[in-house]
Amino acid sequence: MLNLPQKGILIAPASLHLSLYQEVLKTHGNTLGLEILSLQSYIQRFFKAEPQTSIDFYYQVRDCCQAIPKENAFYASRSSFAFIQELADFAGLAKSYALDFEKLPEKTQKQKDLKVLLKQIQDLPFWQQEIPEILDKDLDTSDVWILPYEYSESEQLWIQKLLASHAQILKLDDPGNRHYWSTGNPRKQAQQIAKTILDQGLEASEVFVSCNDNAEKQVLAQIFDQHQIPYTILSSDQKNPFADAFLSALSWILESDLDHYLALINLLYPQTRQIIQSTLRNFPALWKQAYPFPEVYEENALLTQEEFESLKHHLTQTQAWLQEHDAILNWSIDTLDAILTTIQSQLPCTEDNLNAFYWIQEQLRQSWKKIRTAEDLQFFKDYIEAKMPSKSIKHHQGVLIGSRKEITPFFSTVFLCGAHAAHFPALAMHTGIFDEAYLASCDFPALSTRLQKQREQLWTVLENCQDLYVLVAESDYNGKDHALSHELEQWFGHGPVFQEFQDPMRWIQPQFTCGQETARALFFDAHQFVGSVSRLESFARCPFQHFLRYGLHLQEREDLKDIRIRGSIYHAILEKLIQKHQKAYTAVDHKELLSLIEQEFSFAQKIHPEKQAFFQTQIQEIFRKMKKLLQSLAAFEKEWHMTTHAQECKVSMSLMWNDTPVLLYGYIDRIDASQTSFMIFDYKTGKRTFALSDFESGQALQLITYAVMYESMHHQLPVGCFYISLNTSLQEASACKINYRKKYPEIEETALEELSEQALESRSFAGIRFQDLSIYADEPSRFGAKRDKALSFETIQAKWQTILFDLLRDIQSGNIQPAHAKDACTYCAYRSICRNSAQEVKKSSRLEKEDVHAI
């Protein structure tokens, strides 16, 4: 039990003052006789003047450093705040130990250059220069109590003086139990802490957990959330919205480019993320000047009219917003006060934001006459970034999660996490310009002496914990072993005891169902089903994807960054070529082909004149692929004897199912026809296969549905329906032939022309044929193997009907399970929603169920 004094002064970290006052009030009934101070606040009473740590003092240090010669190795850093701060900190530490600057080391050139700098600033009013005199005085600190804590090197000087002047360390009457445990990994470590708190019924407000880094804190927070254990994270790096916005404004003034402008308005006007910021990224010149956006839409394959109108609307919105906020573009060193006012008006008026505003305002007041150039402003910005006071915690609840330096006897139970060799004891040493090697050349206490004092302080803190649990993860998440701390093993007298933790939590598979009434309301609007063939295929591949897209109408995030080079441009070019040249389209002149491609890009180039180089690259790439594609299709067109009847043909069909009207629609890329028959072709940019098993499971309905629709509209005989792949990827071929009939096998190299011819002749089409194609094709084998028998259209139509009705019945039943076909998640926009609930299944045939309805 920690015996808190009723009277006197208690020195403790500022983060614990609130908790200590509450404990004193609970123990003694009032806090009138006890004053709780931080060490810095207490020792200030011994100084004649306020400590010089303001920005004005750092400007003085910087100004003194300007006089050094160019030959000095640190000349380029003389205006850097990070360097000035390090220089001032060392000079202050040297003053604390009363070092003679004339005796600083100068054996190396680096030491000589540093001595020049230190002598330039030695006469400045360092507050630490009073420390040696104060430490020599006789002080009466008999009414002072010190809470055990890991104090810094400069603070240890004061702790030793206070203890020598009769101050007392606040200790436990009877230290409690110590436990040294190990777990499998850091997550198991966090789970073991939560289990111990729950199993032992510990009061959360009396528990402290020490973590090495923010990653450990976040894992612990997740585990505590799962077990509903209240907690508060003590973090010294919590960001302040006001400070972040002000620093972003300074960055914008220093470097006025689009990235800094977007970063600034993202903090001040977060509502601009969706449209304004996306539009500015899409049109990077817009924020500086008027943009020559076309007024009228021109037909092209890259941008639909709807997309054009959307872009135009966003552009108008953005231009209006920029005009309304044009003051930001004129922000400069001379408008810093106006910047503060603008930021204050945009951010919520919280206590933390107000404190940040007043603090920055005071720093600006002190620096007003100093900030004249960009270099001055950079110095001011770096100071604000480094010295901005951390967010203070006004109240906390539950377990406190912090760092090892915040461990005190105040807590009844302390968990010290991650205590392996890399993090324990992890004593502090000087690094940077004034590292331990430099200090060893000065008249500082030896490193071994300073480290020993740190050890003694650390053990004092741990020995005064009421109940201490030291935990170490045997390995990280990648399985890399952690070395144990030799000093901890010596202190405990044994190694850690492994804790076998069985996670009691069981993951429960979420239930995905919406009920028949809900399904009818979502998918059968006005008691009818209206949809495309791709919608039915979507349900067959994954019911949950269909539910999200067509039931909840969740849209993919709109991408305004760029115009996408879609596969539809190949469709558009082929359509125009066939319309103009009919069968001879594959022999089109290359100049005409290039001109046609350039026409498709001309409107996009008007919208994005700054992306000419990108568009030219794409034009050449598509030109190269189209030449290969036309060469590949030439062999097919030479052997195919139907005339192209229609392209991009809209088809639709209505039928009844269970007294429910069903309307299906779609667009057929190409229909070839004779006087009595027709063939359906559908262009696919990638490689596409067709399998009857996919058709029977409902995943490949498109071709058959188009054939049924067109037949019902025009009453012609379908001969088949096939995909035409626009893929121009490389094909494998044998580079040579080996003749084994000779006494000695001979190798005959295959000519390139022969390989090309073989590749063209081997081209086949995926789909299904309903009758003999020998009348229309010289090589019917391209449309399926010779052994494949043509299936009658009537048989396929009957199967199609059964599959369609079974899909509709399944949709109406409320099935929204994320049971998906293979590869259905690859390009799914919703995979982040179902996540681990998704299950890959083999889709069975829907023909096993009988359906009595007829078209």
Image: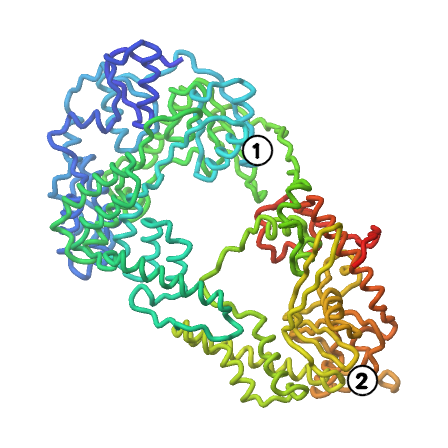
- Give the CA distance from mark 1 to mark 2: 70 Å
Between tags 1 and 2, which lies in front?
A: 2
For label 2, the crowd category at 10 Å Cα-Cα, with few meaning under 14, some 14 to 19 and many 20 or more, is some
Image position of 377 with respect to 182: above or below? below
Query: Residue 104 got which mark?
Result: none
Query: Residue 188 got which mark?
Result: 1
Image location (x, y in percent) of residue 775: 83, 83
Looking at numbered disc 1 in the image, what kind of residue is underneath it? Lys
Image position of 125 with respect to 641: above or below? above
> Left or right: 502 with respect to 221?
right
Q: Which quadrant is home to the N terminus?
A: top left
Image position of 300 with respect to 269: above or below? below
Say which residue appears at 16% left-offset and 25% top-offset: 45
Looking at numbered disc 2 in the image, what kind of residue is underneath it? Asp
Image location (x, y in percent) of residue 435: 31, 45
The kind of secondary structure element at disc 2 is loop
Image position of 551 with respect to 578: above or below? above
Image location (x, y in percent) of residue 838: 66, 46
Image location (x, y in percent) of residue 315: 38, 63
The residue most toward the top is 28
For label 1, the crowd category at 10 Å Cα-Cα, with few meaning under 14, some 14 to 19 and many 20 or more, is many
Determine the image quadrant of residue 653. bottom right
Q: How many marks?
A: 2
Say which residue appears at 69% left-offset and 86% top-offset: 752
Determine the image quadrant of residue 384. top left
The kind of secondary structure element at disc 1 is helix
Residue to which mark 2 is pinned: 778
> Left or right: 326 with respect to 307?
left
